[in-house]
Amino acid sequence: MSSKLPLFNKLAILPELLTTLSELGYEHMTPVQAETLPSLLAGRDVIAQAMTGSGKTAAFGISLLNRMVVRDFTPQALVLCPTRELADQVTKALRQYARGLGNIKMLTLCGGMAMGPQLNSLEFGAQVIVGTPGRVLKHLKQGSLSLTGLKTLVLDEADRMLDMGFHASMVEVLEFVPVKRQTLLFSATYSEEVRALSGRFQSNPVEVTVVSEAAVSLIEQVFFEVDPKARVAAVMALLRRYQPESAVLFCNTKQRCEEVLSALREQGFPVSALHGDLDQRDRDLVLVQFANRSRPLLVATDVAARGLDVKDLAAVINVEMAFDPETHVHRIGRTGRAGQTGLALSLCAPAESHRTLAIAEYQDITPVWQDLPTINVLSKIPAPRRVTLQINGGRKDKLRPGDVLGALTGEGGVPGANVGKIDIFDLHTYVAVDREVAPAALRRLAEAGLKGRNFKARVLA
Ligand code: AMP
């Protein structure tokens, strides 16, 4: 398949960059690069759905380096990333791509690091800044960083930056960058919030969506032949053997979902089901408990999982084979995100084997078959680390995450490290807390209240 993808030297890329790419062994573009680079090089704003492993770093890297004025030591490109790890990774990759261009200085500015060395490096100047939004903003506000000469702004893993609460900081950065610039937005998922962010930062962006071959290849796929009458037992054996931190279990029908759900529940697995019949409130709750990992297993049909915005999913289990290879790839593409290898476990009954063949052909892979694990059914299923507290108050009561966190962790409360995701809806708030501190957290809420009021709260089973 890769041989059908275009070569880099078909594009107007500097010869020095082309040489480096060929030294690195990059010959053909990845799908994301083929889709985005022509627009990127033409100076257009681009919003692209791309995950780690897709080759997105090289896509925006080639573009921003291609327009760099090497002699000018003012920052010309800013890449905002959600985490220090990603910022380090991006800087490393960009350094590699820039090595043929002469003296290009890159600087990483991340929170949690001492300011002193960052201030020193800034004095020397750098053409490329990579950093997390909070720390970059801090430098902008105190005047240690000036972006008036910026040409390219990249929002990398925009969805994760939003998840990490960087929205306000990102928007504030806008006040410090020129209006005339190129803005690139990369995100593994497109939510309303990501679109809103694009609207705020970008003008008339070219939109690119590709299921990347490269990302899919980060996924370890294993197929298991299953007796169709023993499918549910096989699912349990896989869960006991692999113990994924989180997993979506795909079924072809709602009936199958229900069958799997009730069997797993009966055995004490922390599982919910996502199906079309749920009302909005129940759907919200299912998604909250799944995302905060208090119910890290989710049984779903393809239709119900549409728009499911999951990240860092440890595993996908195909309880039955999808009807077509496209659906299969879409299912398994939900794992292996954020650079982690994902696990895709597929149960295939003899009557479904033609579907596995079609997948093998579509993905150009040789399927790896293994025997189903034999597991002692009495082996303990580990309880999730966190439970969800439901508070009967929400946005309508003007509750904000800070209020909830403050109340829980205030004097005599529970340590902040024991508190996970806080989700606020109109009438309810859900807080993930470590199982062992749940009683203390409830006590604390009853005693201290929230914003001077008392709200009912309970631990969800
Ligand atoms: P990224 O999605 O940016 O994290 O890149 C994923 C990996 O693919 C990195 O290890 C890159 O070095 C590599 N890579 C990016 N583009 C290409 C290409 N066109 N050919 C071969 N490898 C590539």
Image (tube, rainbow, N blue to C red):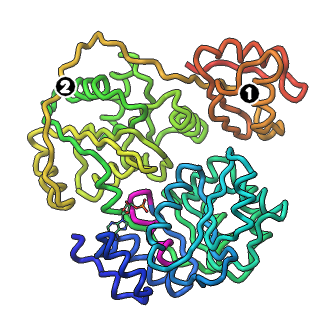
Q: Residue at x 74, y 73 (%)?
A: 147
Quick check: 320 left or right of 119?
A: left
* 190 or 100: nearer the viewer: 100
- C-alpha span from label 2 to label 1: 43 Å
Residue 193 appears in view: no
Q: Is residue 355 magenta?
A: no
Magenta stretch: dominant SS? helix
Secondary structure, mark 1, is: loop
Quick check: 208 left or right of 354?
A: right
Q: Residue at x 26, y 39 (%)?
A: 345
Which residue in the structure is indicated by mark 2? 373
The numbered mark, 2 or 1, whose residue comes first in the sequence reads 2
Instruction: Please tell me how crowded label 2 is: few (under 14), some (14-19), or many (20+) other residues with Cα within 10 Å.
Output: some
| Highlighted range, magenta | 51-64
Amino acid type for the residue under numbered disc 1: Asn
Q: Is residue 52 magenta?
A: yes
Residue 106, position as x, y percentages in the image:
59, 66
Residue 179 vertical position relative to residue 110 in the rendered view, above or below? below
Which residue in the structure is indicated by mark 1? 392
Q: Residue furthest top?
A: 378
Q: Nearer the viewer, mark 2 or mark 1?
A: 2
Q: Which mark is residue 159?
A: none
Residue 133, position as x, y percentages in the image:
69, 57
